[in-house]
Amino acid sequence: MSLLRVRDLTVRRRDGHELIAGVDLDLAEGDRLGVVGESGSGKSLTALAVAGLLPEGMTVSGSVRLDGVELLELSEQAMTRVRGSGVAMVFQEPLTALDPLMRVGRQIAGPLRRHRGLNRREADAEAVELCRRVRLPEPAESARAYPHQLSGGQRQRVGLALALACRPRLLIADEPTTALDVTVQAEILELILESVAAEGAGLLFISHDLPVIASVSDRLAVMRDGAVVEQGAVEPVLAAPQHPYTRELLTSAVAAGRLPGDPGWEAGR
Ligand SMILES: Nc1ncnc2c1ncn2[C@@H]1O[C@H](COP(=O)(O)OP(=O)(O)OP(=O)(O)O)[C@@H](O)[C@H]1O
């Protein structure tokens, strides 16, 4: 069944200039769709448009259906509810999603109280449980830490716990490992995959890095200059890319020995 169906998604700047144009995406329930493309190709704006989080002044048209519900027609209030339980996002830099002055456990407890109706004590306990699930060390102690007291990888675990708090149907991860060390990257990727599998959630994963996309996705969409130039199941697209830009991405990944089957793939992950 279709979880996310995006049609003719177009985002314009205040002056009418199209930043993304005519984007179509399909994600089935429990599937993982990777969106790959160079910086500025429109990946983040696509994700933000799906989550209803576009910057002020941008306008959006087309259709974004989540579980059959047209999100672009929802009021801001209804969209806030969708963000509570339908769509959650993990960003490149978790600090942007975290309040520096609040203990992380309290931050995770916030949406649990707002969207799942837990009382303070229940929400605090569930926040510690989420810290354990994302494998923060000493979960109860980690929950009492402030964001600056954690490492980058630990903060991204908190970002993921926040996103999972409301049991989203769709998790959007926008370059979630780009700011992290290579070894930590692999752990966080694994954790994201494990978490969406455990929740039965769909994953929309965004990265400029084709090998990373290939390692986490069932399907991929290749974006360039605000448009999707190629889309399909990962293996056939990589085996026989149709668009010259996909071939270009593939050639540089292969040259770097960074695709499955290449020597050095495991080391480069
Ligand atoms: N707040 C904004 N105001 C005006 N233009 C913007 C804004 N955010 C993004 N853009 C423009 O929209 C286009 C797409 O940007 P977007 O951030 O979606 O690309 P991206 O593929 O996610 O790149 P990156 O990986 O660097 O984030 C770019 O031309 C960018 O300059």
Image: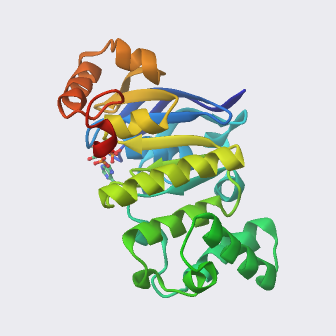
- Say which residue appears at 40% left-offset and 18% top-offset: 237
- Residue 114 x %, y %: 74, 71
- Say which residue appears at 45% left-offset and 83% top-offset: 100
- Residue 268 x %, y %: 28, 44
- 213 vs 229: above or below: below
Left or right? Give the position of 211 relative to 94. left
- Say which residue appears at 26% left-offset and 43% top-offset: 39
Foreground residue among 219 and 21: 219
Q: Which residue is most to the front?
A: 263
**Residue 255 shows in the view:** yes
- 129 vs 63: above or below: below
Number of marks in picture: 0
Left or right? Give the position of 112 relative to 5. right
- Residue 239 x %, y %: 36, 14
- Say which residue appears at 52% left-offset and 86% top-offset: 145
Foreground residue among 76 and 44: 44
Within the image, what quadrant is residue 255 found in? top left
- Quadrant for the C terminus, please: top left
**Residue 169 shows in the view:** no
